[in-house]
Structures are given as C-alpha cells and as structure tokens.
C-alpha cells in the first residue's frame, strides 16, 4: 500500500470533515464570480468538491495519486482518474487543488507542476489552491494524535523541521481472526513561500488571503490566472 493509500484508509479518523467543508464552501464562493463551464480537481480525494460543483452544472474531472481515493470518488459516480497533472491532455476553465495538495509537491518539482497546470488551463483560466503557512505547519500540523474505531487503531506523529513536515501514520487493522495487521507510512509535506506564487511569469496573481482554519493565518488561499 502506498503512503497516500494508507492516508485514504484513515482520513475519516483525522477529524477534518468540518475544515474540509469550510474549504469547499470557500472555493465555491471564489469560483461563483467567474463563468466556469468545466473544472479539474487535482488531488480530488474522495470527490467532495466535485459533488458540489456538479450541482452548479459544471463539468468536473478529478485526478489523484491515490488509487483508493479515485475508487471512492468513482463510487460516487464522479469522473475521477488515477493520473498526474503531467498526463492531463484536456483544457479547463478552472483547476483547483484543495486542502494542502500543493504542499505534497516537492519544491524541486513545483515549477514543473505549475507549468503542467498552466498547460491544462484555457486562456485566462484560473488555478485556485491553498497551502499551509509556516505558522500552520509549526503550530497546527506539528504534533501527535491517536484515534480509533471498531477495527482500526491509528496514531499520527507529525514533526515540522527544515521547512518539511513528516507525518508518520501507524494503523493497526483488526483481521477477521482477531489478529492485527500493522501498516505504517510517512507522508512528507513541504512549505512553499507565498512570494514564489507572486513572481510567476505565466500567471497573474488575482488573490492571496490568509485563512484562519484551526488557528490564525495557518493557511493561505491563492487564486492565479493564466496569462
Ligand atoms: C488532504 S487530501 C485533500 C483531498 C481533497 N482535495 C479534499 O478537499 O478533500 C490531499 C489529496 O491530494 C492527493 N495528492 C497528493 N499529491 C498529489 C499530486 N501530486 N497529484 C494529485 N493528487 C495528489 C492525495 O492522494 C490526497 O487525496
């Protein structure tokens, strides 16, 4: 199982439903001001935001690098695929990456990722995403927690150091014969300076606002427009 697939198996125990719903409402409000006919959700997860946009008659595609996430989105009747942004060969009025997806991208690969987003956008297309701030990484994400349900016990141990958050997920899954299977993975997220997004030559910065999700200014929402 990949690290992202283990994340998919335990996400429901992390207590992030409220913040996910908050972000989905925010993205809906931002994009409501534009005429969007089709949209790509990069890092779509289980497809919550795609479900919302479908209600507004927007054609939505989603991609994710966890096959388990893609299966969950497809089970909801959504058009999701296991694919990287570099493999996308269509163009969209808007692309979104919701809830830290860009923090999963290594700094050395970020410009390449953004260039692929640019290629997949129509003229003047929008890229809307959120990233963790330094404060969010060190004061909110860093720390330990545990959670459990009937057949699953989870520990999460996250450490932020040198602009990098390493989160170790350890899951004990109860088998039918009452033994346990242990699955362990580390997911790394990277801090990206907001300055980088302001200086891009092929995008115009439309909006950059701090969000108070769990604390004060722990995330930032960015809207870029293709030029
Ligand atoms: C915190 S979850 C957010 C899921 C979803 N956007 C939401 O709002 O519920 C991050 C998602 O990004 C996916 N992901 C991480 N890096 C990715 C990449 N480079 N391309 C596509 N998906 C990625 C993960 O598999 C995971 O589903």
Image (tube, helix red, strand yellow):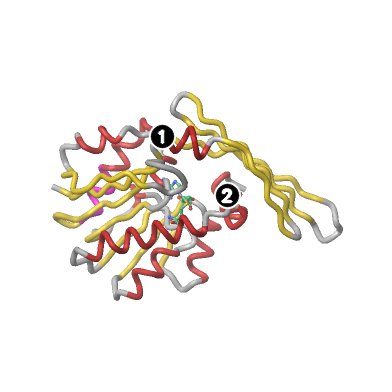
* Mark 1 close to ligand 1, CB under 8 Å: no
Front position in the image: 19 or 122:
19
Which numbered tag is attached to residue 17? none
Magenta region includes residue 139: no
What x and y, as percent, mark residue 44?
Answer: 42, 57
* Mark 2 close to ligand 1, CB under 8 Å: yes
Overall secondary structure of the magenta section: helix
Magenta region includes residue 119: yes
* Sequence-earlier tag: 2 or 1: 2
What x and y, as percent, mark residue 96?
Answer: 32, 55
How many C-alpha atoms fall within 10 Å of the one at disc 2: few (<14), some, or many (≥20)? many
C-alpha gap between disc 2 and disc 1:
18 Å
Which numbered tag is attached to residue 106? 1
Left or right of 93? Residue 134 is right
Which numbered tag is attached to residue 7? 2
Residue found 37% across the figure and 54% down from its top:
42
Instruction: Name the element at disc 1.
Output: loop
């Amino acid at each position: 199982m990949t690290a992202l697939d283990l994340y998919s198996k335990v996400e429901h125990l992390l207590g992030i439903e409220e913040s996910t719903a908050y972000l989905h409402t925010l993205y809906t409000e931002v994009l409501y001001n534009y005429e969007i006919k089709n949209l790509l959700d990069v890092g779509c997860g289980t497809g919550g935001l795609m479900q919302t946009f479908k209600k507004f008659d927007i054609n939505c595609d989603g991609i994710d690098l966890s096959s388990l996430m893609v299966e969950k989105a497809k089970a909801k009747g959504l058009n999701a695929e296991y694919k990287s942004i570099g493999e996308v060969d269509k163009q969209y009025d808007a692309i979104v990456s919701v809830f830290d997806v860009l923090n999963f991208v290594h700094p050395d690969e970020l410009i390449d990722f953004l260039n692929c987003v640019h290629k997949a956008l129509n003229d003047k297309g929008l890229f809307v995403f959120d990233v963790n701030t330094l404060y969010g990484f060190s004061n909110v994400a860093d720390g330990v927690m545990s959670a459990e349900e009937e057949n699953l016990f989870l520990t999460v141990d996250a450490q932020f150091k040198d602009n990098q958050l390493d989160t170790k997920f350890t899951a004990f899954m109860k088998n039918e014969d009452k033994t346990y299977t242990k699955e362990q993975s580390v997911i790394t997220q990277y801090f990206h300076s907001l300055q980088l997004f302001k200086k891009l030559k092929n995008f115009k910065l439309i909006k950059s606002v701090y969000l108070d999700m769990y604390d004060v200014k722990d995330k930032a929402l960015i809207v870029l427009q293709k030029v």
